[in-house]
Amino acid sequence: MTSLPRRVKSEAKAPTSEVDELPSFLNSSSESEEEEEEWEPKSKTTKRPRLQKKNEAKTKKITSPRSGVAGKKVKKVAIKKEMDVSLHIAPAEDNKVQLQKSKEDNVGKKPEVSSFQGMNVKSLESDEKPSTSAPVVGNQVKQEKSEEDFAFDEPPLKKIKSATSPEGKPVKSLGCNKVKEEFEMNWDIVQVLSDRTNVEPWVCSNLIRLFKEENTIPFIVRYRKELINNLEADALREVQQTLEELRTVAKKTHTTIQKLKKEGKLSGCLFTSLLNCRTLDELDHVTTPYKTGSKGTKAQRARQLGLEPAALSLLQRPMELNLFSYIRPNTKGLANIQEVEAGVQHILADIFAKDKDTLDFIRRLCQQRYICIQSALAKVSSKNSNEKDIDKFQLYHEFSCNIKSIQHHQILAINRGENLKILTVKVNIPDGVKNEFCWWCVNERWRPKQFLKPELMRILRNSVEDAYKRLIYPLLCREFRSKLTSDAEKESVMMFGRNLRQLLLTSPVRGRTLMGVDPGYKHGCKLAIISPTSQILHTDIVYLHSGQGFREAEKIKRLLLQFSCSTVVIGNGTACRETEAYFADLIMKKYFAPLDVVYCIVSEAGASIYSVSPEASKEMPDLDPNLRSAVSIARRVQDPLAELVKIEPKHIGVGMYQHDVSQTLLKATLDSVVEECVSFVGVDINICSEILLRHIAGLNATRARNIIEWREKNGPFINREQLKEVKGLGPKTFQQCAGFIRFNQDYIKTFCSNKKTQLGSHALITKAGTRLTNEKQGKKKSKPTPSASYQPNPLDQTCIHPESYSIAMRNTSGFFHAFKFTQQYH
């Protein structure tokens, strides 16, 4: 770095013939400036270069519009020296000539000048050569840039700056953040989605497009992580759920607009207010005054009597109001002055309770105060309910807690007790909220424009109190209860999903022969012995808890020795502890010698339901339902993922109040968790069951059945390319599922070797996915089977997606040679 400035200094003295050339810092892009910042010394970043003096301006024609913008040569000379920060001001005449010349020569170049003005000193000092060699430096920078972002036959990735990556992160951007939705609103769905989920806007924009293209969450998380900033699956589910809620609001808004337009109630102001709604609550507040109820309210009946002009006049022109003129002795509701005042009061209360500003004020007021939820034992529960059920809710007989600190499980427990009519629940709002609200309404929001008589002021105050007590207070209670319940249900579903994921991803016990035991008293303990490949070897029933334990021990020992089984799996149902003590005593006495027998206990939740399901009947048609549960218990240890996916998730029993939450939300979340776990683990397509296969990303029951039928008809799959031959698996489905499907290479190698001896004259093409070529003979050759026309691909054993095979093969050519050598060696 010491020799280069010397060369710059010596070259700066020679005059140049390039008169009209701009300085290199105006020709270079911002990307080249960022690249050159990497090797610049830190000591130069805090000082500014000395500007060009008058006697140095003769070396090159000035083309910059400001006197402070000098040629690169002189600038580098200044950098070589002691970096004098003092500014040299040229004489007034020279400045005037210089400015006039710059205006004439640089017309339309204002953006370049402004970009130069915003440059930092580091970018100005990054050029090490004079301006005559600026194009060469720019080419070098561009070449380095292209080498950094080089991706085989693909354009360089765009750098998108985010909060977590301010320097810019290479991301495949799908376009601008503006996303066109089916129902247009006055708010940007990308920005609203980003605000609610705390996800960056460019990630939300990419996710909206990915979901619109029917990409699954497992596929996005694994193969599109650069588009989502490496978000996890749970975060994607939250974004997807929030996106559906926003689309629901937009769809309902446009439906309401069409309805109001048809009824002739739609105005320009109402139309704008509807398009501004972002939640269903806001939409309900805007449309409430225009709803037609099934039965008339007090305000509607008063309006039918013609008292609405009187109510509006009390607020607008109270000096002209005369309530006695509305008295009709023969009309119910207008017979006397008291009835007229009551009607006006009901109309005013209805206006106050439906005003958006009034509701916003009372909500803000409640957020600043102590609002608590209380529960107590219902008076009727002691007569109609069972004492055992009442004792379950003993903690909530006299319960009170702030709504900001109450736990989710407490809300669900209170709701269940209320549904069983054991508890009574209410939301307690302090009286200070009511007093402050009434004062604000009378003195600020609904203050009459003219002086009010005492009797009219009394009507206004009574109307505000009536609106709060009869309309607003119940509305707030419903909103608080609804929000607490909604948050508690979401947390319950998320907890269910987390527990289910941990259970599905439990480490399997492979390579062992297992004995599954479904314990019981009267009907005995059901036994099932399965092989290391999950095949049923033997089933039986023993009665361990009816005085025949010694005789049954001989039978158990004989079975364990016969099938070389040393692991016993006991279900945690009825008689679990007694069965555990029975086996523990025999093991302690070394009764099963020479076998070293061990036992474990697993959850049998859902085993009984699965044993009578259609899937179990199809899988084990000749087996008694009581024995099927023992088989399921043993398989839960051998392969938890493959066995638990056969059971409906909500029957596994790892959730909290799962029967009290929204079943639609619960089913959607749990199905997504199961799909995520099965996809990330992967399945061997040649041995997996149809039930397991249908949980792969992109597949469903019909496509899984078609894959099984193709496998039974044409033999096992050799590589992933054969999936394209299955009926119903188009390009999109193949893209979603291909990366999660595995192949047992030992099984395929055996199959291919057998096929080679059968084909004879047919030769397998070495390249994966290519067809066989028939040798030309006199007669026509028969078409080879689809399974025989493919060669195993070692990349099919990995999680690399087929769309990236070409890149992987270029980078791992040595791996293929080693793989082929290993295959030949073995």
Image: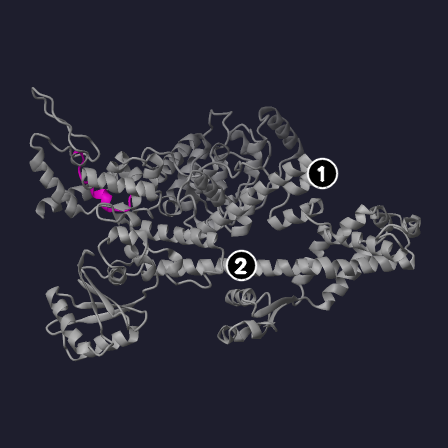
Q: Residue 133's x, y, as percent?
A: 42, 31
- Left of 658 or right of it: where is 602? left
Q: Tell me which segment is drawn in magenta.
A: 789-800
Q: Give neighbour class at mark 1: few <14, some 14-19, many 20+ (Cα, 10 Å).
A: few
Q: Please state which of residues 788 and 108 is positioned toward the viewer in this rendering.
A: 788
Three-letter code for the amino acid on which mark 2 is drawn: Asp
Residue 472 location in percent, x, y? 71, 58
Closer-to-camera residue (105/454):
454
Mark in front: 2 vs 1 = 1
Quarter-of-image position of residue 440: bottom right
Q: Residue at x 43, y 46 (%)?
A: 228
Is 798 contained in the magenta span?
Answer: yes
Residue wearing tag 2 = 487
Q: Quadrant of residue 813?
A: top left
792 left or right of 61 in image: left
Q: Is residue 496 visible?
A: yes
The kind of residue on which mark 1 rests is Lys
